[in-house]
Amino acid sequence: MTKPALPAEPTTLPAVGPVFGPSNPAPAEAARAPVKFYASMVGLDPSKEKTYRELHAQVWPEVVAAIHRANIRNFNIFVTEIAGRRYLFSHFEYIGTDPESDFASIGGDPTTRDRWWPLTDACQIRLPGTPAGEQWRSLEQVMRLP
């Protein structure tokens, strides 16, 4: 059996709600886990991809420190092309207990806020549906196998 082909033009599909089970715990159960997983995506400006790759080949120590202080570990960013457009996908593990405060602390770091983000954000293209004030669009986790 072959997989169905994707439509040539994007279509809007009806949203299907979450389904919870052993490999996709309900939010209350996931909140009790010692490690939480986050993923998000953003567009990549192809004319600035080289700059983006160069920046991420040697992330500045101050930025790395701010990420670690925010209880983020195993932070990864991937790039792919879909339908002729470039996208970045990020994934990280969060080991703290107050993600809102910890994530906000990264924005409080002057090197990250005033120097790093202006450089990296200029390489990115916000996706439709990304909440106001955010650069990356969050993704819903539907499965995790430890």
Image (cartoon, grey):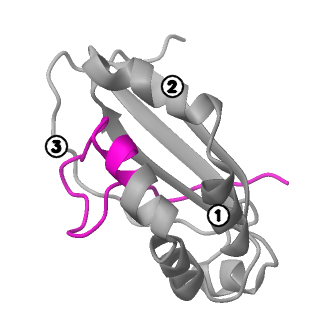
For the magenta stretch, what is the residue range?
117-146
From the viewer's perspective, tell me whether residue 73 is left or right of residue 58: right
Which residue in the structure is indicated by mark 1?
67
Q: Are marks 1 and 3 in contact (CB under 8 Å)?
A: no
Q: In the structure shown, which secondary structural element does the residue marked by tag 2 occupy?
A: helix
Under mark 1, the amino acid is Ile
| Quadrant of the frame with the C terminus | bottom right
From the viewer's perspective, tell me whether residue 95 is left or right of residue 40: right
Q: In the structure shown, which secondary structural element does the residue marked by tag 3 occupy?
A: loop
Badge 3 density bin: few <14, some 14–19, many ≥20, Cα 10 Å: few
Q: Is residue 24 visible?
A: no
Quarter of image, res 15 = bottom left
The tag on residue 46 is: none
Residue placed at 41% from the left, 64% from the top?
A: 113
Gap between marks 3 and 2, in whole Å?
A: 32 Å
From what the image shows, is residue 58 above or below residue 69? Answer: above
In depth, the one of 115 and 30 nearer the eye is 115
Image location (x, y in percent) of residue 56: 57, 34
Quarter of image, res 94 = bottom right
Quarter of image, res 99 = bottom right
Residue placed at 24% from the left, 46% from the top?
A: 127
The tag on residue 53 is: 2
In depth, the one of 124 and 51 nearer the eye is 51
Q: In the structure shown, which secondary structural element does the residue marked by tag 1 occupy?
A: helix
The disc, 1 or 2, on the residue closer to the chain's N-terminal end is: 2
Badge 1 density bin: few <14, some 14–19, many ≥20, Cα 10 Å: many
Image location (x, y in percent) of residue 27: 59, 80
Residue placed at 82% from the left, 78% from the top?
A: 34
Under mark 3, the amino acid is Thr
In depth, the one of 61 and 138 nearer the eye is 61
From the viewer's perspective, tell me whether residue 67 is left or right of residue 117: right
Residue placed at 63% from the left, 29% from the top?
A: 57
